[in-house]
């Protein structure tokens, strides 16, 4: 078991290095750097000026060296200009040239400065991850129990009307991406001219103009049911269908097993069989699926935060990517890649723990 | 003229879709009549879920085909006074024409744009899925069959791509700056090579024992394939028949790139399962080459799950294309594709919902149809 975890962690580290290098390469392509130079210094720079700006800011060093600098394993660049002033990667305004450390990269905890937000990347990242954390927490609290319930209820008695209805619902939700369900939900519940809000307002049942709020901006200060409901449901819906279908498949399989029949023949009641015998075995497969659902949630988070204007991780990623904020984008991709890889690792290890039939060696 | 009421709008729309109804009716009548001779496709008509899914999918396929007949207005024309018009508003100055589903914020007809958007989605999504399948199959078969170093290497690369968050990948791959560097062209050059290799190897292994026919078939397929390849990947087709708009190429390549690793994993898994079967051992004893066994013994037996996944994957690709449009990546502002129309419409969502809701429902119904179709196919293919 220990060897398995060690080997998996090794592969994971390699993957993370490869992925961050690819992102580094893609964000540091020459056109991006030229755009950065023009946006940082002056839009009307000539090509020569752009080249010298890039040179004096350490962007003309070999790609691998720059990646090493960013990672913090290679000493940062320094540049002495004509007047003898020394600038460098690790020389910040509040740090003298002598006090500056040789290496400053991600490993030293220095994520650089965001060009869009004009703040340290780590500060922006921490704040946005905090916002997204709340969103994810509520999504999980809504999605997992609902999906498992639907899956168990429809897989319990295969082929019944309940099963048909719930399965159709599950298929329908997997066919509805977040940008579709979000739009429809806003129109239904968060629009002053369409959906149910005008009717409710006319009847005097709601004090405001809409039932739910169509944006989640106010949820960044204080989360309430009315400003957070729609984004959470939008993300959860897409995941519910998939998890429910997996749960249903594993539940139907378990229900055909010999020991379920034995229990029935012994005279155990149906409810007892489900709770005591079937559920434990039926929930192993969905566990993996739920863990592997995290990368998908990341997608949903980006779409929903953009749609509902909630300034979390996804919104930050979109801002960084569309405004050529290289350091911010790199930091976002590190987080995203880590989330994906760690959940993969947990799902693998968890699967082995939950299913004693699997022997590793 | 008064605005139309909802029943009238629906009736007018039904009339506009007349070519689709006729084509749909013919398809169903013919398929129903010959269903016993049509194999898996015929069996589809035994399951109601599959039939509903098939009907929805074919509805959109025919809509894309007859889009010119169905659309009531030019999807790019901006008519004065029709900005954010509500559904059923009569067009000013033109007697007897309406904006059936209203106008968007640039005063274009939402209905016509939705119909025209179907065309773009239904060209790119299936084509990209086919290419992704060819890449996945060409790499997945040897990975599963030979195992060893090939498998380890290819699996590592596939997992690498899969560990990338899709949206981040799109933002990195589909930007105007990236086109300057030529990365999409390089990706296209690699990915578009696989269909050519696939067909050539397929024919070569089949007619290996008959050199005359082999040379003819492989030569012809290579000539045709490389001709298309030169046009699609490099835009250097001398006759100009094969070409692809750089924007479209960029989108197309990134969608294939995202999908191919999943197909690879599925094919590899199936091959690992099937290669221990007796008929594979029999083929090996007969002295059949590894590629003949992979392509002509294993692949036909893996078709069930692959066809099902193909349907699901077209739906998934449609969702991906919509995501790209939603973030405004790789599409021109006039483009009528559903994702970018949803994005355009969402800015005024709370006041004028119709420009965003119409393409949203269209996209949802198409993906739902594909999912139902896949479900029906899975049910029927498991029966034999």
Image: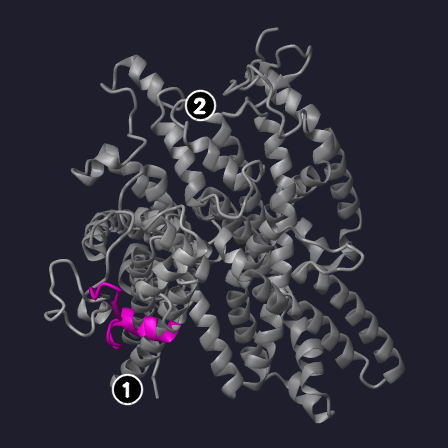
How crowded is the residue under tag 1: few (<14 C-alpha within 10 Å), some, or many (20+)?
few
Q: Which residue is denoted by mark 1 in the rendering?
A: A3
Picture layout, residue A32 above or below residue A221: below
| Residue at x 33% of width, y 38% of height | A308
Task: Looking at this view, name the residue that lies furthest to the right.
Answer: B212
Where is A108 relative to A293, above or below?
below
Q: Distance from label 2 to label 1 (Cα)?
A: 59 Å
Q: Could you tell me which residue is drawn at 84 percent across and 79 percent down?
A: B214
Callouts 2 and 1 close, C-beta under 8 Å:
no
Magenta residues span A63-86
Residue B70, label in figure: none
| B19 left or right, relative to A43 | right
Asked if one can make out residue B69 in the rendered structure from this viewpoint, the answer is yes
Query: Residue most toward the front?
Result: A83
Q: Nearer the viewer, residue A71 or B204?
A: A71
- Badge 2 crowding class, 10 Å Cα cut-off, few under 14, some 14 to 19, many 20 or more, is many
Q: Position of residue A59 (x, y in %)?
A: 35, 65
In this view of the protein, which residue sits in the foreground, B357 or A284? B357
Provide residue A146's location: percent of width, then percent of height. Answer: 32, 48
Which residue in the structure is indicated by mark 2?
B352
Q: Position of residue A288 (x, y in %)?
A: 35, 65
Give the percent coordinates (x, y) of residue A314.
32, 49
Give SS at disc 1: helix
Q: Is residue A79 left or right of residue B265?
A: left
Which of the chains bears the disc numbered 1?
A
- What coloring was used for the rendering? one colour
Q: Is residue B173 left or right of residue B63?
A: left
Q: How many marks?
A: 2
């Amino acid at each position: 078991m220990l060897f398995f975890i060690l080997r998996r962690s090794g592969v994971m580290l390699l993957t993370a290095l490869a992925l961050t290098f690819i992102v580094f390469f893609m964000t540091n392509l020459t056109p991006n750097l030229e755009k950065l130079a023009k946006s940082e210094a002056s839009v009307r720079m000539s090509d020569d000026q752009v080249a010298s700006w890039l040179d004096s800011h350490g962007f003309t060093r070999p790609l691998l060296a720059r990646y090493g600098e960013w990672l913090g394993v290679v000493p940062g660049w320094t540049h002495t200009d004509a007047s003898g002033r020394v600038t460098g990667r690790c020389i910040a305004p509040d740090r003298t040239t002598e006090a500056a450390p040789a290496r400053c990269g991600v490993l030293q905890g220095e994520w650089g400065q965001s060009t869009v937000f004009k703040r340290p990347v780590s500060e922006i990242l921490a704040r946005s991850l905090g916002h997204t954390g709340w969103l994810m927490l509520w999504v999980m609290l809504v999605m997992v129990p609902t999906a498992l319930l639907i899956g168990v209820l429809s897989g319990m008695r295969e082929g019944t009307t309940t099963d048909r209805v719930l399965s159709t619902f599950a298929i329908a939700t997997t066919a509805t991406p977040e940008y579709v369900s979000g739009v429809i939900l806003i129109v239904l519940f968060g629009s002053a001219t369409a959906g149910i809000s005008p009717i409710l307002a006319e009847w005097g049942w709601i004090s405001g103009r809409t039932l739910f709020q169509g944006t989640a901006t106010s949820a960044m200060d204080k989360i309430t049911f009315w400003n957070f409901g729609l984004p959470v449901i939008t993300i959860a819906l897409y995941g519910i269908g998939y998890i429910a279908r997996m749960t249903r498949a594993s539940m139907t399989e378990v229900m055909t097993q010999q020991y379920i029949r034995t229990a029935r023949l012994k005279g155990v009641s149906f409810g007892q069989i489900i709770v005591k015998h079937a559920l434990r075995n039926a929930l192993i497969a969905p566990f993996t699926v739920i863990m592997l659902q995290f990368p998908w949630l990341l997608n949903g988070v980006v779409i929903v935060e953009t749609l509902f204007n909630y300034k979390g991780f996804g919104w930050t990623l979109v801002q960084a990517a569309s405004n050529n904020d290289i350091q911010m984008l790199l930091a976002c991709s590190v987080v995203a890649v880590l989330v994906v890889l760690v959940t993969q690792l947990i799902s693998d290890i968890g699967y082995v723990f939950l299913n004693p039939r699997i022997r590793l060696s | 003229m008064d605005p139309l009421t909802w029943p009238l709008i629906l009736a007018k729309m039904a009339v506009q879709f007349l070519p689709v109804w006729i084509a749909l009716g013919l398809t169903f009548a013919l398929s129903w009549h010959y269903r016993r001779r049509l194999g898996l496709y015929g069996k589809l008509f035994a399951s109601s879920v599959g039939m509903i899914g098939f009907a929805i999918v074919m509805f959109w396929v025919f809509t894309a085909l007859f889009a010119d007949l169905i659309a009531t207005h030019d999807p790019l024309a901006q008519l004065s006074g029709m900005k954010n018009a509500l559904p059923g508003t009569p067009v000013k100055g033109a007697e007897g024409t309406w904006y059936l589903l209203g106008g968007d914020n640039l005063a274009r007809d939402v209905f016509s744009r939705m119909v025209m958007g179907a065309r773009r989605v239904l060209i790119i999504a299936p084509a990209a899925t086919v290419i992704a399948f060819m890449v996945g199959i060409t790499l997945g078969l040897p990975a599963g069959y030979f195992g060893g170093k090939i498998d380890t290497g290819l699996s590592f690369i596939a997992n690498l791509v899969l560990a990338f968050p899709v949206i981040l990948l799109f933002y990195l791959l589909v930007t105007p700056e990236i086109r300057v560097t030529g990365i999409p062209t390089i990706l296209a050059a690699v990915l578009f090579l696989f269909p050519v290799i696939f067909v050539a190897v397929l024919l070569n292994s089949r007619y290996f024992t008959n050199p005359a026919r082999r040379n003819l078939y492989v030569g012809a397929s290579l000539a045709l394939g490389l001709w298309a390849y030169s046009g699609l990947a490099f835009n250097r087709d001398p006759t100009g028949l094969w070409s692809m708009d750089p924007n479209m190429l960029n989108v197309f390549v990134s969608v294939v790139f995202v999908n191919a690793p999943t197909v690879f994993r599925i094919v590899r898994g199936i091959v690992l399962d099937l290669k221990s079967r007796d008929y594979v051992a029999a083929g090996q004893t007969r002295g059949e080459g590894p590629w003949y066994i992979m392509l002509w013994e294993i692949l036909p037996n893996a078709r069930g799950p692959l066809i099902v996944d193909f349907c699901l994957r077209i739906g998934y690709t449609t969702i991906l294309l919509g995501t790209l449009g939603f973030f405004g990546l790789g599409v021109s502002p006039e483009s009528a594709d559903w994702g970018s129309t949803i994005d355009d419409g969402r800015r005024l969502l709370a006041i004028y919902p119709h420009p965003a809701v119409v393409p949203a429902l269209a996209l949802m119904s198409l993906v739902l149809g594909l999912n139902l179709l896949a479900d029906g196919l899975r049910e029927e293919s498991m029966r034999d």
